[in-house]
Every structure is written in C-alpha cells, then in structure tokens.
Image (cartoon, rainbow, N blue to C red):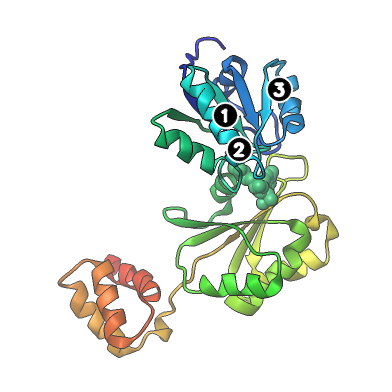
C-alpha cells in the first residue's frame, strides 16, 4: 500500500464506503494509514472502518457543530507541513456532509486540497436507476415538514433533468404522497434503499404504484434511501401549434437554448418545458 505517495501540507478528502466495507480504494487506505491525522465526522464511527483495515492513526472530530472552530486548527497543522485526511461517516465528504467551510478556508489560504474519490450514495443510486444521467440535478435532503416539502417539489415541477434526493425511509410514504400531489401520480420514481448492504433494494414505478408498494411492505421503510425522480417531460399536446411554429422558425436560425428562451418570452411559456421538445425536433431533422 505504501506505493501511494503522500504529500505534506495537503488536505485529502477521502471517500469511505456507504455500507459494504469492501468499497474503499487501496489509495484511500494508504492515505488513511499515512496522514498525520484523520478529521472525522464521528471518530467512533470511523474507528470501525480503521479497525477493519488494522489502521492505527490519530483521529480528530470535525462535524457540523465545530467545523468553524476546527478549520483554523487544521489549517495551522497543514501550514506546519502536516498532511490531513477528512472523512465523513459514509460516502464522499461535503456531499450533504460537513467539510465545505474547511475546504473553502484551506483553498483561500492556498493550501492543497486533494480528493480521493470513492462511494457516493447519490451516484451509486443514479448508476443503477435507469434514468437519464447525461444531466441531473442533486437536490440533497427534502424538507422534513410536508408543507415545505411540497413547496420544494413544486419548485421543481418543470425540471427536465433527473432529480436525486436523500431522504429517510421512515418519511418515504409521506414524501411519495407529496410527489403524487405536486408532480402527479404518473411521475416515474426510483427508490434505492440500503445500497451495498444486505437488504439492498432498487425499485421503480410511477409515484402512485410506488406508494401502494411502500404501504404494503413496512420493511421498505427501514435503513437509508436515495430517491430519484424522472425529469419533467414536455407533452407535445401541451404545446400549442403557435408556440411550435415560433420554435421551429427560431431553431432554423439559432441554438436550441436561445430559441427556447426567445419562444418562452414571446408566448409566456416555461422554457424548460420547451427545451426537451426542441431537442426532439432537432433530432428528427
Ligand atoms: N456523503 C454521503 C454520500 O456521499 O453519499 C451522504 C451523506 S448524507 C448525510 C446520508 C444520506 O445518504 C442518507 O440519509 C441516505 O439518503 C443516503 N445514503 C447513504 N448511504 C446510503 C445507502 N447505503 N443506501 C441508500 N442511501 C444511502
């Protein structure tokens, strides 16, 4: 493992497994063994991973509540030439996890920050969901209260990209009900639960059927979950012939993005809804 060179004065952002402890790279293990100190979201949690790989190294806690205080101390150690790893409880640090303030602080001081890539629940779920991944929108956690959650979902009603959320399975029924209310029962949704663990389940259906499936199996309300919602699909029948004519004329002269923006302005329609349709027109030619 020692063939992986480690640099002084460097903050390594190390991804760790999201369940299966085998999902860690040899480089990540080498970095965790060799750095001067490992900053952890929860030292006891990370200790289990370190013990599994017989890594004995110093740890320091750095979580949401002490990140601002810790950042000066960590930056000082880095300036003295120390190398430090940052890990979260699971997956990639900073992705809905602590570390943003520390990384920004280190970069503002000109200190090296180097990613050691690995597991991320959002990307793992997306890779197995069977929904478009060429463009997607990571939305993090949905609000826990229904009114705020419905508001957040409504704001995304015309989002044409695949949307990825983190959610707690115990809230899944309420969340799917809110999806039915705001985006409609026909919207296609994927639930990716307990990824890389014994009870890994990836289930997809339209929101209405998914709700029925969840309600009849309480086991699906346990563990950890990523929710993926298919992007809004513009229905040609919803676009008037007047709008289509304008769009076609403009598409002959300019790129789809600009054509959609101008058409949207002329006719007072949503440009996101037009974009997918414009691309389909373009590929028909
Ligand atoms: N930084 C992590 C990452 O890279 O995925 C995410 C941290 S966030 C605090 C934790 C959330 O990630 C969970 O509530 C769940 O939505 C999702 N998650 C983590 N592990 C998971 C797993 N094994 N299966 C499904 N979702 C998971």
Marks 2,1: beta carbons within 8 A:
yes
Disc 1, SS: helix
Q: CA distance from mark 3 to mark 2?
A: 25 Å
Q: Nearer the viewer, mark 3 or mark 2?
A: 2
Q: Is mark 3 within 8 Å of ligand 1?
A: no
Instruction: Name the foreground residue: 105 vs 218.
Output: 105
Label 3 or label 1, whichever lies nearer to me, is: 1
User: Where is residue 174 drawn, in percent x and y?
Assistant: 74, 69
Depth check, front residue: 263 or 57: 57
Residue 236: image quadrant is: bottom left
Position of the N terminus, as image quadrant, is top right
In the image, 282: left or right of 208?
A: left
Residue at image mark 3: 50
Contact? badges 3 and 2 (CB < 8 Å):
no
Q: Which residue is mark 2?
A: 69
Residue that numbered label 1 is attached to: 73
Labels 3 and 2: the sequence-earlier one: 3
Residue 255 location in percent, x, y?
Answer: 22, 66
For disc 2, the neighbor class at 10 Å (few under 14, some 14 to 19, many from 20) is few
Residue sticking out furthest to the left: 253
């Amino acid at each position: 493992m020692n063939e992986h060179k480690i640099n002084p004065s460097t903050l390594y952002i190390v991804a760790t497994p999201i369940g299966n402890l085998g999902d860690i790279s040899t480089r990540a293990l080498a970095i965790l063994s060799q750095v001067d100190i490992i900053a952890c979201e929860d030292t006891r949690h990370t200790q289990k991973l370190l013990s599994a790989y017989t890594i004995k190294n110093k740890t320091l806690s750095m979580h949401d509540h002490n990140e601002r205080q810790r950042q000066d101390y960590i930056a000082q150690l880095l300036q003295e030439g120390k190398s430090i790893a940052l890990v979260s409880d699971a997956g990639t640090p900073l992705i809905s996890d602590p570390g943003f303030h520390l990384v920004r602080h280190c970069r503002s001081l000109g200190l090296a920050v180097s990613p050691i890539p690995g597991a991320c629940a959002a990307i793992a779920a997306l890779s197995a969901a069977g929904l478009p991944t060429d463009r997607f929108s990571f939305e993090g956690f949905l609000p826990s209260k229904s009114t705020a959650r419905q508001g957040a979902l409504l704001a995304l009603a015309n989002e044409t990209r695949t949307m990825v959320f983190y959610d707690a399975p115990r809230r899944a029924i309420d969340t799917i009900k809110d999806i039915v209310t705001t985006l409609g029962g026909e919207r296609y949704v994927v639930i990716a639960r307990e990824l890389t663990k014994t009870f890994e389940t990836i289930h997809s259906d339209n929101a209405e059927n998914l709700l029925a499936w969840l309600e009849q199996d309480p086991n699906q309300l346990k563990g950890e979950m990523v929710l993926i919602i298919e992007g809004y699909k513009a229905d040609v029948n919803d676009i008037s012939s007047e709008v289509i004519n304008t769009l076609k004329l403009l598409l002959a002269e300019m790129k789809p993005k600009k054509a959609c923006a101008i058409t949207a302005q002329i006719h007072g329609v949503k440009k996101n809804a037009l974009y997918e349709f414009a691309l389909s027109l373009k590929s028909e030619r």
